[in-house]
Amino acid sequence: MTCPSDGPVDAATLREWGLPAPGRTKQSRGDAVVVGASRRTPGAVMLALEAALRVGAGRVATLVPGSVDAVIGAQLPEAAVFALPEDAGEPIDGAAATALAHADAVLVGPGFDDVTETRATLMAVVKTGVRRLVLDAYALAVLDDVPRGALPRDLVLTPNEDELRMLTDTVDGDDSDLGRLVVRAARRFDATIAAYGLVGTPGGALLRVEGGGPGLATAGSGDALAGAVTGFLARGLPSDRACAWALWAHARAGDRLTVRRGLGFLARELVGELADAVHDLDGIG
């Protein structure tokens, strides 16, 4: 089944699309790398890394400031951990550069808290030869300062509403139609956009993914979504399908938690629910 050019994506659609066969080794499910974190917000990277694993990525690695690499390594032993250069303007080399160049999908942004350093790090990351790139959080704030040609052709953005308005130069209240804003951002940056159950493509298509509720509006939820998108990309899905799968799994995980707990579940609980959400459709045990 081809991806619909416009309209709803529901569970039946996703079942018909399916997911790539898992294969026999972790390498067959793809490598995901997450670049981000700061001393103030190291947890964002951990949420994104675990989300990528929970949706089926085979291996994960992360590049983080040296001030937090030991913490992240201890908290998420499944991940390979590399320290970013002390000076964000320095090139990334050695094993870290190899991990980025060989990754099936790379996410930049979760947990960064300095715009200048984020831009320098993003440029250093893309110079390693990254093929599929997801940008989130502070990495979205630097897009206007980065030539589109410097970024990979396969680019995905995962903005929240404030970031979506920033990407489209829209003042809050000027346009309440998030679908229109998603399409505008997709065209402006020649990227696939995943936000609020919507997937916008550079060609102007808008997909609407069912599910979700107010419980998803919790700290760290966006990091979980960005990680899920990266995980599905690492598994080899096209960008629009990876975003649709991630939005559905994210929403389904929230729905499952809402039934059991009501409002007030945590992002780390949401991440832990992703594997069961995917299993609800994919059925591979």
Image (cartoon, rainbow, N blue to C red):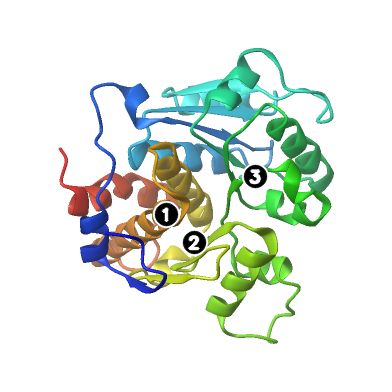
Residue 271 placement (x, y as % from top left): 38, 47
For label 1, the residue is 266
Q: Is residue 123 left or right of residue 128?
A: right
In this view of the protein, can residue 70 be seen by the observer?
A: no
Query: Within 10 angstroms of label 3, few (less than 14), some, or many (20 or more) residues?
Result: many
Q: In this view, does 242 lie to the left or right of 112?
A: left
Element at label 3? loop
Q: What residue type is labelled 1?
A: Leu
Which mark is drawn over residue 218? 2
Residue 28 placement (x, y as % from top left): 33, 26
Q: Give the quarter of the image for residue 110.
A: top right
Q: Is residue 141 left or right of residue 70?
A: right
Query: Front-most of 230 and 259?
Result: 230
Whole-angstrom CA distance, mark 2 to mark 3, is 18 Å
For label 3, the residue is 109
Nearer the N terminus, badge 1 or badge 3? Answer: 3
In this view of the protein, can residue 105 be seen by the observer?
A: yes
Please say if the residues under marks 2 and 1 sit with CB atoms less than 8 Å apart.
yes
Nearer the N terminus, badge 2 or badge 1? Answer: 2
Please say if the residues under marks 2 and 3 sit with CB atoms less than 8 Å apart.
no
Query: Front-most of 163 and 1?
Result: 1
Query: Within 10 angstroms of label 1, few (less than 14), some, or many (20 or more) residues?
Result: some
Element at label 1? loop
Whole-angstrom CA distance, mark 2 to mark 1, is 7 Å
Q: Which residue is drawn at 47% across and 51% down?
A: 239
Q: What residue type is labelled 2?
A: Thr
Tell me: residue 191, above or below residue 73: below
Instruction: State the count of labels.
Output: 3
Query: Within 10 angstroms of label 2, few (less than 14), some, or many (20 or more) residues?
Result: some
Whole-angstrom CA distance, mark 1 to mark 3, is 21 Å
Residue 274 placement (x, y as % from top left): 32, 48
